[in-house]
Image (cartoon, rainbow, N blue to C red):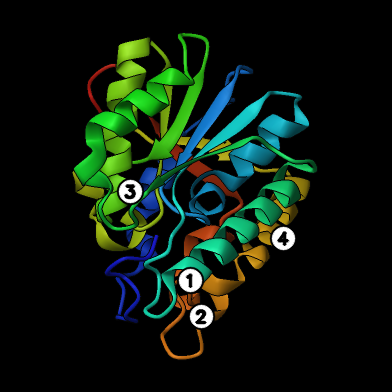
Amino acid sequence: SEVGIVTRVELPDLGRWAPQRTDAQRWEPPRKLTVVVAPHPDDETLLSGGLIAHQARAGVPVIVLAVTDGEAAYPGDPDGLARQRRREQRQALRALAGEELPVLRLGLPDGRVEDHHSSLVAAIAEHVTVDSLVVAPWRLDHHCDHEAVGRAAHEAAGRCGAALAEGLFWAWHHRQPQEMVSRLRELPLSRREVERRRCALSHHHSQVAGDGASTPVLHSGVLGPFDWPSEYFILSNEGDDPL
């Protein structure tokens, strides 16, 4: 959630998404193994924190495939930042689920996920079946790693016959509603799920507070969608390919 997007810029009004959000059909996630494919530590929270809390509360098993360690978020000490962000992710997931969740770390290079497409597809496919729900970024989520992970998850889910829910974060700011030809699905969050998601975000201190020299990746200007009381997804197993 960071490479190339750390500079604070004037962002379009999120109100342009109001028709799509209003038209979104309510969605109840299936109660089956949920595999969350997170490009960087914090994406599990930003894209699907409410969903993770929802599934955990229902007793649904959740595992996280941590694609990168997010070491390129800021210049400086990539190894130290990677260690910090792995720790932040563990804490955030504990806040979301109320317990430790399995995290499988793939260790791909932050900012260069696309270079490892085949191995990422294989890693995702290894952990999903037709009885799984795969959760990943939308393939147009305006970040090279998010989009690469989305494409790999789409291919792996298709190969295995698994359901796929694509979440949005950067797309809210950098894409236009007309780029989305599929109807959004809405997961309304309970008050407790909203609280868990907010608590989880606070654990990603490196991203919300910055490194003291650079603009924080998750500055207030980009967190508007995080204040919505629902999360939104595109379901890739419904009709046409939703790009």
Q: CA distance from mark 4 to mark 3?
A: 23 Å
Between circles 2 and 1, the one closer to the viewer is: 2
Which residue is located at x 42 percent, y 70 percent?
Answer: 78
Q: CA distance from mark 2 to mark 3?
A: 21 Å
Which mark is first along the chain, 3 or 1? 3
Label ID, residue 199: 4
Which mark is first along the chain, 3 or 2? 3
Locate residue 114: give its quadrant: top left
Amino acid on which disc 4 is placed? Cys
**Residue that carries the numbered disc 1 in the rendered image:** 218
Which residue is located at x 59 percent, y 20 percent?
Answer: 33
Label ID, residue 146: 3
**Residue that carries the numbered disc 2 in the rendered image:** 210
The answer to whether residue 74 is visible is yes
Per the image, label 3 sits on a secondary structure element best described as helix
Residue 20, horizontal then vertical, whole percent: 36, 44
| Residue nearest the observer in this picture, 123 or 179 | 123
Do tag 2 and tag 1 residues touch (Cβ < 8 Å)?
no
Amino acid on which disc 1 is placed? Leu
Question: In the picture shown, does residue 214 fall above or below 28?
Answer: below
Which residue is located at x 33 percent, y 24 percent?
Answer: 122
Question: In the picture shown, does residue 180 fall above or below 194?
Answer: above
Q: CA distance from mark 2 to mark 1?
A: 8 Å
Amino acid on which disc 2 is placed? Gly
